[in-house]
Amino acid sequence: EQALFRTEAVIKSTGKAAGLSAQEISKMSRELQDLTTFSDSAIQSGANLLLTFTNVGKETFPRATKAILDMSTAMGTGLKESAIQVGKALNDPILGVSALTRVGVQFTEQQKSQIKVLTEANQVAEAQAIILAELEKQFGGAAEAAAKGTGVFVQLTNSIGNLSSAIGELVFKRIEPYIQKFNDLVKSFRDSDSPFKSIISNVLVFGTAITGVIAGISS
């Protein structure tokens, strides 16, 4: 739920640059969870970072998200790190190629030249496609491969987590109105001039003092 809230906030702050809704990104995250060892919330958190790079459009976004998972798995890095690296590369392909090269992604001089020409000609999507194709060539399928064999236990853990979340959501929907009412009550008490606040304060001070005395005698 928190990941979804953050997705909605990023989509709003970036002016819907990616052309995707929060629900679409959540659906994509769940589908990728079923294929990999990453939880849907972790995937969505990575996607949230990718959303901040406003040159990554609707057609490129799903492919880029999958590339992040593959890269993280193959290189043993966190999704956050990979999302930022891939996001930067796609947002500014010319500088991005150099940045990816420094972390071990290999590009030929011909590819670098093509990316530069395409970017300068404002054909950013085509330049991004070259970068993604190379990422897929070097890391493609790594995330799905990790879900095989003993990876099924990680997938089971993620599925159980989803079930727990679904149950928790049902429970929360029932108790949320009461929590909100109690929160409002506490706020009103906090902001009031009620004499009870002074009484409670004195009790706490007295209790702290007595505790200190007892502790001193015991030592």
Image (tube, rainbow, N blue to C red):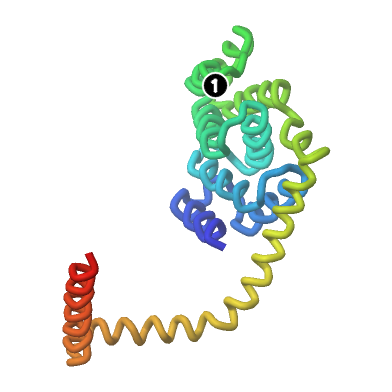
In this view, the residue in front, 105 or 183, is: 183
Residue, far bottom: 195
Q: Where in the figure is residue 47, as x and y percent of width and height?
A: 58, 45
Check disc 1 and report its element: helix, strand or loop: helix
**One can see residue 120 in this view:** no
**Is the residue 169 above or below the residue 61 in the image?**
below
Q: Amino acid at mark 1?
A: Leu
Q: Where in the figure is residue 115, as x and y percent of width and height?
A: 58, 18
Quadrant where the image shows the C terminus = bottom left
- The crowding category of the residue bearing disc 1, from other C-alpha atoms within 10 Å (few below 14, some 14 to 19, many at least 20), is some
Would residue 77 appear left or right of 39 to someone viewing this image?
A: left
Q: Which residue is mark 1?
A: 100
Q: Where in the figure is residue 89, as x and y percent of width and height?
A: 53, 27
Name which residue lies at 43% across and 86% down. Answer: 181
Name which residue lies at 51% across and 34% down. Answer: 84
Would residue 72 appear left or right of 218 to someone viewing this image?
A: right
**One can see residue 102 in this view:** yes
Residue 116, by quadrant, is top right
Quadrant where the image shows the N terminus = bottom right
**Is the residue 37 above or below the residue 202 in the image?**
above
Would residue 186 appear left or right of 205 to someone viewing this image?
A: right
In this view, the residue in front, 49 or 148, is: 148
Residue 210, by quadrant, is bottom left
In this view, the residue in front, 30 or 76, is: 76
Residue, far top: 109
Total numbered labels placed on residues in the image: 1
